[in-house]
Structure formats: structure tokens, C-alpha cells
Amino acid sequence: MAASSKLDRDQPLTLVLGGGNALGSYLAGAYEQLQQREIEPQWIVGGSIGAVTGAIIAGNAPEDRLPRLKAFWDEAMISTPGLLGRGTKIRHTYNELHTITALLFGRPGLFGHRFPGMLSMLPWIPHDVALYDHSPLQQTLERLVDFDRLNRADIRLTVGCVDLESGEDVLFDNTRHELTPEHFLASSAITPIFPPVEIDGRLLCDPGYTNNLPIEVPFAEPLKEDFTCIAVELFSLHAARPASLSSAAERANDMIFASPTRRTLKGLKREYALREQLEPDGPQATLLHMAYFAGSDERAGKTFDYSPSSIRDRWAAGRRDMEKSLALLDRAPADKHRLRYLALSPEQEAASAEAGAAARA
């Protein structure tokens, strides 16, 4: 069956949110634009900061979701005066100073130093498995998320982790499990920065290295009707040529986290081509894909850059990219293929990243 070009409010909508630590305010901005259009997901799938964002959305009443997301990021950012625009050497230095500050002193409500942590690399110090302690995130989640509401599953929420011993993906779902703050700590425990979390006898960590954007999860469900999936990731495979050691390190980091998405997309396209041959008139899936394109001032340490300018720029970019993506969906012609894939061009994403917080509505 051919789908309408516009987002059909009667179709199930799944929101897939990727990981990226301080880049996660992009996810909040994307959700804000959805809510402004009165679009709410029935199912959220997330890993790391994507899972945390999903918890704040699913664990609050609609009118409280944006204020709680804003509270989370207001508390996470390092309070320094003034805002700086993109594309200046001063801004580059500003970002790096905030990254160093976060790594030196941690972020209240998110993470702090642990002992022995980094000192365990010295020969006479006991062994440790992580550099920082992210247990402060538990208190933040308990304060900002109503876990009774979350576990009622008014919005289905699936949280991705990885078994650190077997390397297998592990999923927790509020329609089958009772989710607690520990599940979100496990999902955001990127090794070896944060310690893994043991749940039900399995040692679990952040899925970023293996599956940072779990797009395949909603597509693994039996397809009984047309549905739309909006996938929002925080690393892009596209970028300008690196011109420094720092930018080369950033590209290496981006490719590590974004490459699994490319492989997943190729697999989905092959699968749906076969579905189309076997059942050409079957239900159609629409995948709208967004990726945060880092600004020219951002480097390898961007995931720990909690500066006010960067947090607000990313939030604003998320809003603009979601607005452009929904417009792309609105303009897309009707398509008879079983899988419709739509994404902004790298040039559009780059322009959005450079626009800065001044354009934020």
C-alpha cells in the first residue's frame, strides 16, 4: 500500500535516539520540535543519553517533558557567562576549556571522579575498571523521572545495553521489565570512562561501540501496518577533511560510533527489497534519519563539552533539523516501496550546525 507523503498521525510512530553524552541536547531540541507539531511517539528506543532522554519523555506527563529536559541540561552545563558564536578560534578554545573543566571536576548530577580511577594505572595502586563514577546520574533520574508512570508504558520504552563479557546486545523494555535507574546507568556506562553495571547477573555497559543507534529494534517487530520511524543520531559519517590532529581524532571517533548505523541501514534495505518481492503490497515502513553534524569549532572532546554555547547550539540544531526533516517528509512523493528512507543532505546538516543558538525560537 502506498503511504501519504505527510506524517500520518494514525500510524504508529517510533523514535530511536542514539548516544553521545554532551551531544544529547540535540535530541532534546529534536523532541521539542516534534511536540511543537503535536507529534508524540508511541515507542522510544534509545541507548546511553538517548535512553536517558527517552526516560525523561516517557516518565513525565506531556506538559512536564520539555521543562524536565531543560532542567536536565541546565544542570549539566557548566555555568559560565556569555554565549559565543560558531566558527571562531576563540570559540574553539572556549569549547576545549569547558571540556577540560568537565574532565577535571566532573559534572554535578552526572558524574564525578572515583578512586583509584586513573591512579590505578600506576603499578603500586589497586586495579580499577573506570575513570569516573556516574552514580550521581541515578539521583538526577530519580528526581526528574516518574518511574511509576514510565513503567505503566503509556509510551513504550526500550533501553539498549551491551553485555561486557559476551559482547551481545541486551534490551530492556517497559512492556516486559520494570525499568529502574540502574538500567539507564548501565546503558550510559561507556567503557572505560564509566563502570559497568551488573543487572540479573550480567555485566552491562553502553552500546555505543557496537550499536550506538539501535534502528533495527523497531524493524524486528512483526510488521502488521504502516509505521514511521524517526531515528536521531549524534555522530555523522560526513565531515570536512581534517586539517589538524584534533580534527583527525574527531573523525576517527565519529566513524567508530556512526559506522554501525550505515551497516544496519544496508541490511534493512536488503531485507525490505526481499519483502517487496515476496509481498509487494504489504505494510510500508518509513524511516526518517537525522544526524548531528558537529560545528567547525568542535573536536574530539566534544562529548564532554558542556559549555552553555555548545549545549544551546546543539539543542537549536536539533530543532532546526527536525523541522527540516518533517518538511522533507511532507514534500516527499508517495512511494510504493516497502521501505522509504529519507534523510537531510550533509550540506543541510552542516548549515544547521553552524547557524548557532541565535536562531533558536
Image (spheres, rainbow, N blue to C red):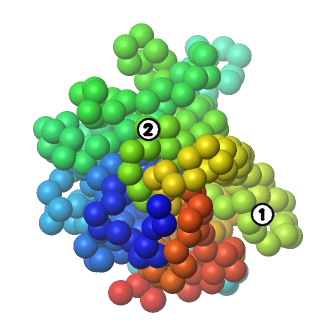
* 28 vs 276: above or below: below
Kindly report the distance in space between the C-alpha atoms of the residues bearing marks 1 and 2.
39 Å
Q: Is residue 308 visible?
A: no
Residue at image location 51% in from the left, 83% down from the top: 331
What is the secondary structure assignment of the residue under circle 1? helix
In the image as oriented, which residue stretches furthest toward the top?
201
**Residue shown at 61%/27% (left/top)?**
119
Q: Is residue 121 visible?
A: yes
The front one of 196 and 14 is 14
Q: Which numbered circle lies on residue 221? A: 2
Q: Which mark is residue 247?
A: 1
Q: Residues within 10 Å of mark 2 (few under 14, many from 20)?
A: few
Could you tell whether 361 is left or right of 268 in the image?
Answer: left
Q: The residue under label 1 is which amino acid type?
A: Ser
Residue 10 higher or lower than 87, as above or below = above
Q: Which mark is residue 130?
A: none
Residue 124 x/y as whole percent: 66, 14
